[in-house]
Amino acid sequence: MRVALFITCLADQFYAEAGVAAVRLLRALGVEVDFPEGQTCCGQPAFNAGYWDEARPLARRTLEVFREAEYVVLPSGSCASMVRNHYPELLPGSREALELAEKTYELSQFLVRVLGVEKLGEGLRGRKVAYHHGCHALRELGVKEEPLLLLKNAGAELLPWEAAEECCGFGGLFSVKLPEVSLAMAERKGETLPEAEVLTSTDAGCLLHLSGVLARKGKGLRVAPLATLLWEAYAG
Amino acid sequence: MRAKARLYPKEAARLLKERPGVRRAVTGATLHFERNRLRAYGEVDIEAWRARAKAVKDHVLSHLDRYLELAERKLRENGATVHWAETPEEAHRVLRDVVARHGVRRAVKAKSMLTEELGVNPLLESLGVEVYETDLGEYLIQLLGEPPSHIVGPAIHLSLEEIRRLFHDRFGTPLDASPEALAAVARRTLREAFLTAELGISGANFLVAETGTLALMENEGNIRLSTSLPKVHVAFVGIEKLLPRFQDLALFLPLTARAATGQRLATFVSLIQGPGEGGPEEVHVVFVDHGRTALLHDPEAWETLRCLRCGACLNACPVYRQTGGHPYGYVYSGPIGAVLDPGLLGLEEAYPLPYASTLCGACYEACPVKIPIPKLLLAWRRRAVEAGLSPRLEGAALKAFRKVMESPALYRLFSRALRGVPLGAQEILPLLKAWTGGRGPLKPSPKPFHQLWQELEGEWTPGNGS
């Protein structure tokens, strides 16, 4: 099986480790991994802000770059949802958009639903983990049980978190258009956060936003992308 | 009501800074409603209920003219007087006439968002009529001179301390009075008003076309009193409030109660068919358009007209929870306000409201009639950009963003530049400054992934497994 990785711009720039982890993990599971040249951003920031004319050429590029792929896997729920759910809206009537949508998966979703992997290893034994459900992963892709299952089966102690399914307040441009509200939302997540060693999520945007606010609050926990933890689950 | 929606970003920031108590009060109350809703939804086949309710509403909206005519006929047969108001001015005329004919000096009002839209209270005051809001929360904010902060819980933003102070100043109650004692004071005042008012004003949760029945839901009993004690009752009904058949109430009453407060049914449901024994001598139903027909013809945004005004989307919305409804600057706040207000006011008037969301989707999950709020937010944003309403700097930034992302070579250049910029310099760029102000500088990975990929390629060749 061959998988084309779509690393997406935020992970590429700020959580490169998530990409490395995804590559190692998929290879370890016997999957061939490509990183198609020429990939940049899926266009989500422009699309969500209403700039569909700016988003469209980026979507078309992405269609071109991943045309030949058997599967496209992203370490990001919101970008996966952009491709899966919004490309067909953005490019109505495009057969390629529908084809790409159908073969695109968020990493944990791909592992569980396509590869049928439920246990990676026990490398997270005893680690206290708080999982933040990225909104688009949760509500647009329906990715809820997959990351929890993989973390739990790797021995992690998943801490109950009242606000786990609440939006962190990132929201792309929202974080700079309404910074005060955005920060208040992250603070609420922080106020309810259990005493975890690691905070993880599918999305680089959420983590970037949350880590900034949590660091200011002096919370000493580690913030790591889900892909990184899943590799640790495997490699120990 | 005059809209101040354009001030939303400033007002939201100001409120967070100056009145942190609002955030606490609103978060606490909405989470309470939200938990109740989830429990109440969990007791039934909610997906089937939502699908059915959506279908009924879509049916009635797509045959609205027919159902409005039927409703008018039935209401007349029941002895009610029917009026049509396209604009607030036309609605005012009906009220002015009633006030003049009956020499109305005092009116009692049941909570109604539509009368907020129409500015009923200022009109009555200008006619020398004393108006009492009779819903307890609504009464509190009337005393404070504030608009409602929530569709269902208008005083959701107030703390007990603030209410104690208000009553202390107004009625001389002690500063540590119990909630029961405060309610007793309000009850005394309002009872006097119920017994002496010549006019009762209400909205309507639903209006059944086949029987001409007004349905009103409440928990305090004040709506029942407002609509039965005074000799004249005027009900303002948005034209989208129609249900085809009486039996539809069997779905919509429990669904709305579950969505709004997590109750199986509201404590009181009043079904009003017209004047008669034990009720008012005159019942007037005013069908109000105020932008709704135009919205009905909007190929995307018409779906907002399914709204039941239950407030479930407000309770579910983490953005709304930080500030309550006031910064939104119009009658309808939260996610539904962000899509309905542009439809009613025009996008230019409501411009930033579609951006008052992270598109997290919690509102859609909560909505009892499946209004696709996130999709509509995206549509309004797209239209705002097309109409040139967005800030010039933002447009330029996204255009530059597209240019960089369209070219892998430029993107790689940007990637190198990002690592060359000293962290302190991020303060200079306006968009980045808004980010770093609350979150500290952005620290890129030492090397971007696309560079690490070259190194990873050597690690593994096809066939050698793990």
Image: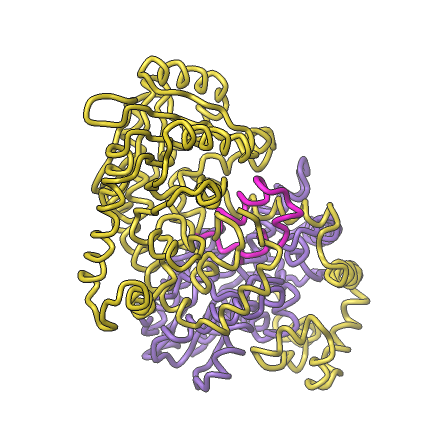
Above/below status of B303 relative to A207: above
Comparing B185 with B206, the one in front is B185
Q: Please, is residue B67 above or below residue B94 in the view? A: above
Residue A160 or B387: which is nearer the viewer? B387
Residue B400 visible in rendering? yes
B283 or A223: nearer the eye?
B283
Q: Residue at x 60, y 48 (%)?
A: B378
Identify the colour of chain A in the image: purple
Tell me: residue B438, above or below residue B348.
below
- Give the quarter of the image for residue B129: top left
Q: Quadrant of residue B33?
A: bottom left
Residue B171: image location, x then y, percent: 27, 63
Q: Position of residue A126 (x, y in %)?
A: 32, 79
Query: Which secondary structure type mostly characterizes the magenta part of the structure?
Result: helix
Residue B352: within the magenta? yes
One can see residue A33 in this view:
no
Instruction: Answer whether residue B374 is magenta in the image.
Output: no
Q: Which chain is yellow?
A: B
Image-based side of B236 in relation to B226, left or right:
right
Residue under the point 45% across and 76% down: A232
What range of the chain is rendered magenta? B335-362
The image shows residue B388 at horizontal and vertical percentages of 75, 50
Comparing B371 with B456, the one in front is: B371
Residue drawn at (53%, 55%), measured in percent from left and top? B328
- The picture places residue B314, in percent across and down from the top left corner, at 42, 52
Quadrant of residue A16 within the rendered picture: bottom right
